[in-house]
Image: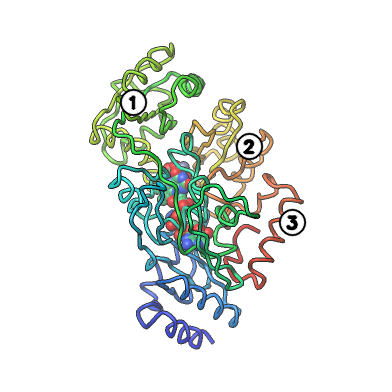
Amino acid sequence: MVNQLVRELRQIVGEGGVITDPDMLVRHSTDWTGRFTGQAKAVVRPSSTSEVAEIVMLCRQHSAAIVPQGGNTGMVGGSVPVDEIVLSTARMSGIEPVDCDAQQVTVGAGATLAMVRAHANASRLAYTVDIGSRDTATIGGTIATNAGGLNLLRYGGTREQVVGLEAVLGTGGVVSHLGGLVKDNTGYHLPALLCGSEGTLGVITRARLRLMPFHAHRVAALVGFASTADAVESVTAWRAALDVIDAVELMLEPGMRLVCETFGLRRPFAEPAAAYVLVEVAAHADPTELLASAVSATPTVGDIAVAVDGGQRAALWRYREDHPLAINQLGVPHKLDVTLPASRLVEFLETVGPLVQSIEPAARTWLFGHVGDGNIHVNVTGLPPEDEGVDDIVLNLVSEMSGSISAEHGVGVAKKRWLHLSRSVAEIDAMRAIKHALDPDNILNPRVLF
Ligand code: FAD
Ligand code: MLT
Ligand code: ZN
């Protein structure tokens, strides 16, 4: 049966378009953290929307489930097969010329975020979604997860950038809306619905993306604080004072020490700080003075390092972007990606570590993230990957504080048992009804979300 399916897949995509070699399947069958692992039956690599449609129809006939996969950098196990067919978008990475009049671009789902960002910059425009996995994560994957990342605070997340989409639904039907009209109130907005659908409703094949003006001037500053509360309060003040903040990220001393020790980086300041904020501003004119006056008006700031050129900025960003890499070196982490209301953020940051420690003395809690959005990455190490007791307690705490159990990584397979903490029964019923309508045979990512 599997052999027959593989033969028919090869008829659609050609000999080289289907991988069955077990060694080559490995990298498609394990996630970035090493927590989720399976054994794909095969990896099929279509190069066009019509091939994707044929594959979906064929898999419906064979009742064979499909896991759509882009860069496989997802954090919730949604791109990892147990024994399904993986549909890789790697061959659908074409990027069309930038439409400078509309300030938009149409790209293939398999194009990486870094490729699209560089392509937009070449036309003095910017694609404003940016995440640490930019060199591997794909446009299709970032849309399917509605990726948040570093610049959401200023420009919105992925959903806000998607003007139109082309996708193959679980029915095998193709929906294509790539005309680029910004105002178009003609019924349900399918691109918005597919955004964040985590491969459960359709395979995204192409996208029409909104671009923003390119800012030629960019300055970053790393600021030390004596407490987490001082750091969070300062961020609130800077957000009110400045309309040029592209990113504002929080780190704490244990994470800073871990990153410096793991990668041999110089400590940023002579004395450690309890908390660090990395703030980056960007504008058409030099925003250094604006940033300097906002920072100097903040009484609690400690040491400051300012970076004006690209090399200096990259050095400061390493402290932040190396957090997930350094934590991975300690073993398979429990990744809890949560949002808190602004009014509960400091309380959560001060409570969660001691709470974890009180139930699991061997566990270490690492806190960092997109503080301007209230999005904290709670990473816990020193626990067996399958022991979800700590996850349960932290996510319940988040829910009691009116937060979300998933800020930006999605639900995948990792968070589905806690979906009810963030969504009502009526919402989950509506989601199931949509799933059934667009994927009646439940062949697209059947283990994800519900
Ligand atoms: P994959 O991992 O391949 O897939 C993710 C999900 O999307 C799966 O459910 C999959 O089935 C589905 N999918 C993939 N492609 C398609 C498609 N074409 N059609 C339909 N469904 C599809 N995420 C953030 O939001 N913010 C961050 O700041 C951030 N930082 C990260 C930093 C690092 C170092 C790493 C490793 C990850 C980070 N992530 C972050 C998580 C991850 O990169 C994002 O979730 C990203 O959007 C996944 O893209 P991908 O192409 O790798 O998708
Ligand atoms: C990040 O922002 O670095 C990732 O989303 C977080 C993580 O690895 O937990
Ligand atoms: Zn993040």
Q: Amino acid at mark 3?
A: Asp
Residue 90 is marked as: none
Q: Position of residue 34 (x, y in %)?
A: 44, 57
Residue underneath mark 3: 429
Query: Which of 27 and 44 lies nearest the eye of the viewer?
Result: 44
Q: Secondary structure at mark 2?
A: loop
Residue highlighted by disc 1: 221
- Residue shown at the point (39%, 28%) measured from the top left: 279
Query: Along the line of sight, which residue is nearer the eye, 416 or 382?
Result: 416
First in sequence, mark 1 or 3: give its number. Answer: 1
Mark 2 residue crowding within 10 angstroms, few (<14) / some (14–19) / many (20+): many
Residue 332 showing in the rendered view: no
Task: Determine the CA span between mark 1 and mark 3.
Answer: 46 Å
Q: Is any part of residue 261 visible from this angle?
A: yes
Q: Is residue 333 left or right of residue 419?
A: left
Q: Quadrant of the C terminus?
A: bottom right
What's the residue type where badge 2 is placed?
A: Gly
- The number of callouts visible is 3
Q: Nearer the viewer, residue 313 or 168?
A: 168
